[in-house]
Image (cartoon, helix red, strand yellow):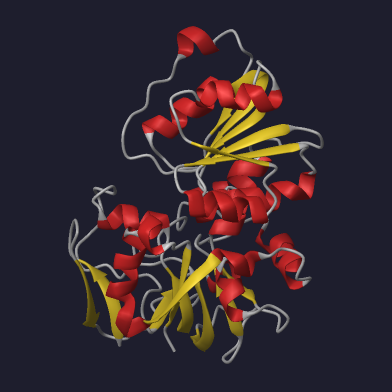
Amino acid sequence: MKALVYHGEHHIALEEKAKPTLENTTDALVKVLKTTICGTDLGIYKGKNLYMRDGITLGHEGIGIIEEVGEGVSQFKVGDKVLISCITSCGSCEYCKKQLYSHCKNGGWILGHMIDGVQAEYVRIPYADNSLYKLPASIDDDVAVMLSDILPTGHEIGVQYGNVKPGDAIAIVGAGPVGMSVLLTAQFYSPSTIIMIDLDENRLQMAKNLGATHTLKTSEDIREKVAEIVGEEGVDVAIEAVGLPQTWDICQKIVKPGGNIANVGVHGKKVDFEIQDLWIKNLTITTGLVNTNTTPMLMKAVATNKLPVDKLITHHFKLNEIEKAYEVFINASKEKALKIIIDAD
């Protein structure tokens, strides 16, 4: 089969690789229909993840058709169309019992990371009963891919961990796919003000179209610009959706006393935590990797066609063009790229 294989920093290649086989009775073999490129994949490509192994197939988001199941799989059968979750869950360990599936002792984020992922024609899914979801016919295939990672990540780690409430003023720093997912799912909770902050004018315009009440371009006086909108004390919730020291710094400067900072971005470098200013502010600061425990709920919301998730999709490529797709995603601002769909069928 064809698979996109990692060979070190800035070195990936579409190669012929052996088709995976079932290794455990709880496995399923899935023929991939569609996948996508995540910002985390881009981070791996750029060397952000220092413990990636040579030869791993990349990717952790997608949908497909089940081709084979192990004897221990009871919830799925051959021919089922399924959503592949970015998180693998055994369902029985200490963390799974707490719904902290991202910290599953036997799984977690392993696809395209610790084991071969979904940017390929086929993928082996461990613990299939807990790591796949049947896709209803009412959800478009391209839209379904957004449910693998970015929508639950934005909702759980940005909105829920940030404790967004009706009437809140919130700021989302970073208008990439996850930041846009925060924007869309935050609207479930009726905040009064949603400020999107980014450098990219094209993404800011899209954010405005998707429900942001205000957009701001990143600048040295961003604190003053936020204050002009919500008052001197700042926002109730600041959500970091990039993973850079600069974007973290914006969040700690614009949050009000008693507020929340929810870090969603994947950080590869240390940041300065201004504890000398923040210790007195009674803040709640959260971090996290998505658990996907809200995926079923989000799937129902998407099935009603009330979330304009399709607007996040900007480009389409075939699997044999995936290296070109990475180039487009690397140059997202120039290419006006947000979410790229890869057709693997």
Apparent side of residue 11 relative to residue 127 in the rendered image (left or right): left
Q: Residue at x 38, y 70 (%)?
A: 117
Q: Is residue 339 above or below residue 219?
A: below
Q: Is residue 319 above or below residue 58?
A: below
Q: Is residue 98 visible?
A: no
The picture places residue 151, in percent across and down from the top left corner, at 60, 58
Q: State the quadrant of the N terminus.
A: bottom left
The picture places residue 269, in percent across and down from the top left corner, at 31, 34
Q: Is residue 8 above or below residue 200?
A: below
Apparent side of residue 165 relative to residue 330 in the rendered image (left or right): right
Q: Residue at x 24, y 48 (%)?
A: 50
Q: Is residue 322 visible?
A: yes
Apparent side of residue 322 relative to residue 165 in the rendered image (left or right): left
Q: Is residue 19 above or below residue 201?
A: below
> Which image quarter: residue 147?
bottom right
> Which image quarter: residue 168?
top right
**Total residue callouts:** 0
The picture places residue 70, in percent across and down from the top left corner, at 50, 82
Foreground residue among 94 and 325? 325
The picture places residue 329, in percent across and down from the top left corner, at 36, 63
Q: State the quadrant of the C terminus.
A: bottom left
Foreground residue among 320 and 86? 320
Q: Residue at x 47, y 7 (%)?
A: 276
Q: Residue at x 32, y 86 (%)?
A: 19
